[in-house]
Image (cartoon, coloured by chain):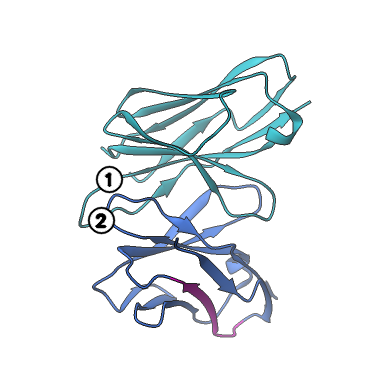
């Protein structure tokens, strides 16, 4: 059974710092992996989707990498801003047609 | 348009009430999902409709009843709920495309059961 963990559970950084959020999964045979952000009491916003054949994806200040063999993905946020404060979740699709398994999330605070 | 809409935004109901949550998407997606999310926890999958057929029921209590009238609409009928059912209910959709099964979420319905 696929299990997903995220470290750290919470992170507080000053504005302008570059930071890395980590996602680990137990079964390396995944179909793809998706990163989301969630503001308090709101829905999830899709940030990046990485297919199993890809090593990384970029969108603006965000870069997500995938290393299937080690069961890890990282989300890199460059030049962090207070507006980046949110909970970041990663989700893994074990195979095509199977549903995403979510990690517990990392709660990020960017201080002005 | 990558929008999934949900109504209502907030719902307060007693344990004897019957209510429904609604979800709509116009992205042509053929899979739609209901998730339940408690505070500071990740979403938990409740139901999946794939091509308008219920494909997975994650052993959710029968007081929750999903309905998919067409490929764009998804309802969740609620009856005789318990206070522990209070949570954020999220709807999502995806294409189920082999090339791209990215999930898009709605803003959620905050449900309080008294």
Q: Which residues are magenta?
A: A16-26
Q: Main secondary structure of the magenta part?
A: strand
Q: Earlier in the sequence, mark 1 or mark 2?
A: 1
Crowd tier of the residue under label 1, counting other residues whose Cα lies within 10 Å: few below 14, some 14–19, many 20 or above: some
User: Which shade of the palette goes to chain B?
Assistant: cyan
Within the image, what quadrant is residue A6 found in? bottom right
- Residue ID at (34%, 54%): B102
Chain in blue (letter): A
* Direction from residue A70 to residue B51 in the image, left or right: left
Considering the image in quadrants, where does the N terminus of chain B appear?
A: top left
**Residue closest to the eye, B52 or B103:** B52
Residue at the outermost bottom position: A17
Identify the element where label 2 is drawn: loop
Q: Are marks 1 and 2 on the same chain?
A: yes
**Could you tell me which secondary element the residue under label 1 belongs to?**
loop
State the residue position of label 2: B100
Image coordinates of residue A40 in percent, x first then y, are 66, 53
Picture coordinates of residue A100, whole percent (x, y) = 41, 54
* Rendered image: mark on residue A56: none
**Residue A23 part of the magenta-drawn span:** yes
Picture coordinates of residue B58, whole percent (x, y): 48, 39
Residue lying at 27% horizontally and 47% vertically, measured from the top left: B96
Q: Quadrant of the C terminus of chain B?
A: top right
Marks 1 and 2 close (CB-CB < 8 Å): yes
- Cα separation, mark 1 vs mark 2, equals 7 Å
Whether residue B14 is situated above or below residue A88 in the rendered picture: above
Which chain letter goes with mark 1?
B
Residue with the most extreme right position: B114
In the rendered image, residue B84, in percent from the top left (x then y), is placed at 73, 35
Q: Which residue is mark 1?
A: B95
């Amino acid at each position: 059974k696929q299990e997903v963990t995220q470290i750290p559970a919470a992170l507080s950084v000053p504005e302008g710092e570059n930071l890395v959020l980590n996602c680990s999964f137990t079964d390396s045979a995944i179909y793809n992996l998706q990163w989301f952000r969630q503001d308090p009491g709101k829905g999830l916003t899709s940030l990046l989707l990485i297919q199993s054949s890809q090593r990384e994806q970029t969108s603006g200040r965000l870069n997500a990498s995938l290393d299937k063999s080690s069961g890890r993905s990282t989300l890199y946020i460059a030049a962090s801003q207070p507006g980046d404060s949110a909970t970041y979740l990663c989700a893994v699709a074990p195979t095509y047609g199977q549903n995403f398994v979510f990690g517990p999330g990392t709660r990020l605070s960017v201080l002005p | 348009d990558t929008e999934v809409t949900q109504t209502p935004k907030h719902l307060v109901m007693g344990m004897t009430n019957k209510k429904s949550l609604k979800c709509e998407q116009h992205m042509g997606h053929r899979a739609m999902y209901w998730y339940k999310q408690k505070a500071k926890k990740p979403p938990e999958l409740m139901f999946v409709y794939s091509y308008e057929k219920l494909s997975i029921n994650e052993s959710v209590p029968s007081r929750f009843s999903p309905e998919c009238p067409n490929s764009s609409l998804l309802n969740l009928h609620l009856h005789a709920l318990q206070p522990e059912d209070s949570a954020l209910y999220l709807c999502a959709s995806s294409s189920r495309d082999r090339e791209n099964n990215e999930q898009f979420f709605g803003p959620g319905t905050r449900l309080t059961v008294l």
